[in-house]
Amino acid sequence: MEAHSFLSKKGFNVQSFGTGNQVKLPGPALDKPNIYDFGTTYDAMYRDLMQKDYELYTQNGILHMLDRNRRIKANPQRFQASMAKFDLIITCEERVYDQVLEDFENREQNNEQAVHIINIDIQDNHEEATIGAFMICELVTMLCISEDLDNEVDEILQRFESKVKRPVLHTVQFY
């Protein structure tokens, strides 16, 4: 969500989604995540975790993240349940990239509208999310100023990859 807020402030039309079956947030131990349905509001998650262990979830940044998220939208949305069409989808974890590609394989396709799906791996912590927001903003800006994205995307991604020193995955799918 860090990138969502940052890109929105830069004037980009942004939507954010989850791809799992449920929303999983870190818990008191690695094997004890907090699990919520996608219909659960960020406010309800915030209040739940505040009651469970205010100190822990303040210290690990989860309450801060949920507070920010609840100011952006009411609740998390699941990508696979969305009928929205996008020009560009950016994922921040290869597992999520694979789930998005799998969803496109299972959708009915009319081959009418291309969508570029790009992955940049970003670790799931506050510092990396902040750095990732700047990287994604730079990449989206580079893509937006292209006069012929379909023919220039590979070159743009190569330049970006060299600059940020992180691997980038890219696929084109169709709605």
Image (cartoon, rainbow, N blue to C red):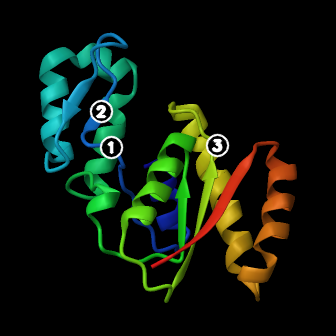
Q: What is the secondary structure assignment of the residue under circle 2?
A: strand
* Quarter of the image where one finds residue 50: top left
Say which of marks 2 and 3 sits in front.
2
What mark, if any, has residue 20 been given in the picture? 1
Say which of marks 1 and 3 sits in front.
1
**Circles 1 and 3: CB distance less than 8 Å?**
no
- Expressed as whole percent of the image width and height from the top left, the position of residue 27 reads 29, 18
Q: Residue at x 50, y 58 (%)?
A: 101
Q: What is the secondary structure assignment of the residue under circle 1?
A: loop
Q: Toward the viewer: 59 or 148?
A: 148
Q: What is the secondary structure assignment of the residue under circle 3?
A: helix
- Expressed as whole percent of the image width and height from the top left, the position of residue 127 reads 58, 33
Residue at image mark 3: 131
The quadrant the C terminus occupies is: bottom left
Q: Residue at x 37, y 13 (%)?
A: 30
Q: Toward the viewer: 21 or 136?
A: 21
Relative to 45, is 141 above or below?
Answer: below
Q: Residue at x 30, y 14 (%)?
A: 56
Q: What is the distance, in whole Å, between disc 2 and disc 3 at their CAs?
A: 23 Å
Quick one: label 1 or label 3, which is nearer the N terminus? 1
Q: Residues within 10 Å of mark 1 (few under 14, many from 20)?
A: some
The amino acid at mark 1 is Gly
Q: Residues within 10 Å of mark 2 (few under 14, many from 20)?
A: some
**Circles 1 and 2: CB distance less than 8 Å?**
yes
Q: Toward the viewer: 25 or 64?
A: 25
The amino acid at mark 2 is Lys
Residue at image mark 2: 24
The amino acid at mark 3 is Ile
Q: What is the distance, in whole Å, between disc 1 and disc 2 at their CAs?
A: 8 Å
